[in-house]
Amino acid sequence: MQPLQSMYDENTEQTYERAGFGATVPRGARPAIVVVDLSRGFTEARWPTGADLTDVVAATARVIAGARDIGAPVIFTTIAYDAAEAEGGAYAWLDKAPGLRVLRSGSELVDLDPRLPVAARDPLIVKKGASAFFGTHLAATLTSLRVDTAIICGATTSGCVRASVVDAVQSGFPVLVPRECVGDRASGPHDASLFDIDAKYGDVVALEDVLGYLAGLAAVEAAGS
Amino acid sequence: MQPLQSMYDENTEQTYERAGFGATVPRGARPAIVVVDLSRGFTEARWPTGADLTDVVAATARVIAGARDIGAPVIFTTIAYDAAEAEGGAYAWLDKAPGLRVLRSGSELVDLDPRLPVAARDPLIVKKGASAFFGTHLAATLTSLRVDTAIICGATTSGCVRASVVDAVQSGFPVLVPRECVGDRASGPHDASLFDIDAKYGDVVALEDVLGYLAGLAAVEAAGS
Amino acid sequence: MQPLQSMYDENTEQTYERAGFGATVPRGARPAIVVVDLSRGFTEARWPTGADLTDVVAATARVIAGARDIGAPVIFTTIAYDAAEAEGGAYAWLDKAPGLRVLRSGSELVDLDPRLPVAARDPLIVKKGASAFFGTHLAATLTSLRVDTAIICGATTSGCVRASVVDAVQSGFPVLVPRECVGDRASGPHDASLFDIDAKYGDVVALEDVLGYLAGLAAVEAAGS
Amino acid sequence: MQPLQSMYDENTEQTYERAGFGATVPRGARPAIVVVDLSRGFTEARWPTGADLTDVVAATARVIAGARDIGAPVIFTTIAYDAAEAEGGAYAWLDKAPGLRVLRSGSELVDLDPRLPVAARDPLIVKKGASAFFGTHLAATLTSLRVDTAIICGATTSGCVRASVVDAVQSGFPVLVPRECVGDRASGPHDASLFDIDAKYGDVVALEDVLGYLAGLAAVEAAGS
């Protein structure tokens, strides 16, 4: 069991240890990278919904490069609403978070950050909710591809990343979150969600750890061929 | 727009206001109460998974009483695993949170807290994951019953309550969370999740506010009859 | 209880009556029209996946016109795969039904039949599976819009229509299927699925019946204003 | 490509061949058996909802025996409603198929057929709808267990089996349906659904074929140990 990296006091850590949280998840032989909402509306500070996530994009690009070496699937998501969807009451979420209505299909805000090494064959999942799994075919795609481990990157940590991590493990996938590959608008919610994720839903680990795991799979593959 | 009740600094609040979060959700004429995991394993301090949630149980009982006056549905959930389920690898979540394996079907831990005013006609949803919606018929039940507002109570705030709130709004239901009716093992994660919920997923409000809303519906009903 | 319109013998009908199937569903005040896969790849005989569904398109246009009078939502679906999705193993369904791989995003085959009166504000749901609900946000959209009755049209009766009908009622919506508004490649599977739908999942009714239902709601609305 | 075993004329077969249906699905190394609703309410003729499915139960028992030899998961489902659920409007499906209200929790009708070789470790999924996947944790369980092939048995062919087959392939699992292991109340709907399943969703094969596939995996395992 790895230590919970706490933003809270010692008492909280002891409470979680007692409850039996924070175990290390198994790592499989067929990981996939799920890149949640690294669209310009979230990675660029010039949009109200965004923040400067240059470092997150760069770190995620390194994970993607590691995935290419073993042919692991890389799946991107973006939130996008048609004009009618944005205004018409079709999504209860937009009543609570009306700022997201600016994420219009066809606008720059929903384009993936151009600094990401997106390949033509990478699936792009257009979503309407917080979780990359809710109301999408992501779980079916991961299952069809026989994926056994989900490496989740993206934004925001306390919003779509966290919701996606919870759904990934509920869907049957062990989850790794490389800490450098997730970002948020503010550090408080970011840190709190990383604590909760690591305690209850997936392993929050260093980028180098994930790169080493992918390189290890590449080595196995090379030896086997 | 209500002020975000922040555990964080002023900057965080400004960032969220700018992003367009924290609007007040519409309140409908057909609410349902969803009581998440107020089973003894979570409400009693004597279990490793639990904490003393006496106050949460008492406050939730008041909301339930208000719901009875208008015949609003009250739906309870509990987490329970058969011995085989608990040990057999059928739930990836249990690899990360092995402490939950103690929640065995037929044990006291999975019984609803006996202090709750449960009626024979209240549906009980047995769940295996964090969200009350994931892998259950809860959304279908709420839709069948023509519910238009979800009032979510229970435990733990940063775990199953939060995951259920996110899924409720994603499923199309405006969400109210009466602050006194949710509880957690530790105050840090509790406060952080209430902040996130109120900012992005549902209105975190005072118990009295929810009771007033239910009483208002009762008055409308009485006037109409 | 309406008579089951049987393609089978009297014994079958008696068996179903005994089992307690074939009741008439309640009709609500807020219907939505779901038009399943009336894209050119299914409505035009010149494609391998298609059949000449001119009559189905014309009948569906009449239902849509009825819906416009009461401002009822009209939601269209189409199946579309990117090149990578079509070839990459991301959908187990395409291994069984490889003919569907021709339904490429951006091709004429996935365009809605131009004879349909599509409005700019109508949601279009791009789906990857048979059911309009599976892996999509359709249920969440119908729930967000407070829809209480699903009128399902489209193609093919034994494929995507039937799968969508089953998911609609499972999701909590009473279902009406106007007989003239659904079509298939061959009459055997078409008739068999209409029998099953009417027995177990939704009411298969005449187009005029549905038009009358919508007109009745329009009259109520006019009287109330 | 295997020939479609048609209940219809030659034209229908040609139409389906042209559409690109009826391919043979890949068979993986980690199958699971899903036994849909072989509860007494469906397998015994004395109940209104039932039919004498003695042969189906016997054939399914042989598949289960084959699964035991390789430790493959065997998962059972049953439909069961509490009294409140059966009467309270919580399931739109029961408005259409009110006969299913007799399937009460705790009654003999919902017990698995005692002639089935159920083991203590086999998961039992209690469902409320037609599909074994809808509103249940079945997909998550199969994914957690790293299953790559779903062998679906049970009742009724045109009802819960077909709905489960459609959801299984949509969820990412190749599907095999051993013909002797599925049954229905009437032969017309049974035959029509087997035709549709084999054309579009999964391979309808002989029992001996499935037994041979399982025995082949057992041989591989024995050789590897």
Image: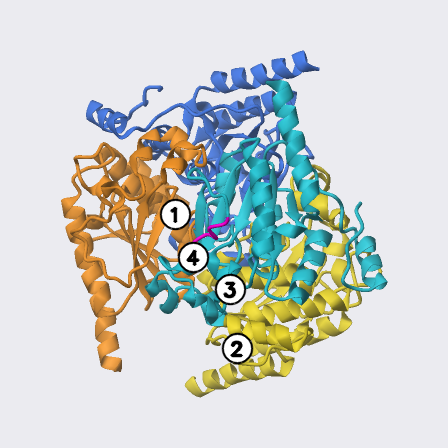
Chain colours: A orange, B blue, C cyan, D yellow
Name the amino acid, label 4: Val
Q: Are marks 1 and 4 in contact (CB under 8 Å)?
A: no
Q: Which residue is mark 2?
A: D70
| Amino acid type for the residue under numbered disc 2 | Ile
Q: Quadrant of residue B198?
A: top left
Q: Residue at x 37, y 44 (%)?
A: A163
In the image, is A160 to the left or to the right of C95? left
Magenta span? C111-115
Q: CA distance from mark 2 to mark 3?
A: 23 Å
Checking the image for residue A166, the label placed there is 1
Asked whether residue B89 is in view, the answer is no
Residue to which mark 3 is pinned = D169
Q: Nearer the viewer, residue D47 or D188?
A: D188
Q: Label 3 to label 4, Cα distance in Å?
A: 22 Å
State the predominant SS element of the stretch in magenta: loop
Residue C90 locus on image (x, y percent): 39, 64
The quadrant holding residue A29 is bottom left
Seen from the viewer's position, the closer of residues B1 and B137 is B1
Is there CB contact under 8 Å for labels 2 and 3? Answer: no
Q: Quick one: SS at disc 4?
A: helix
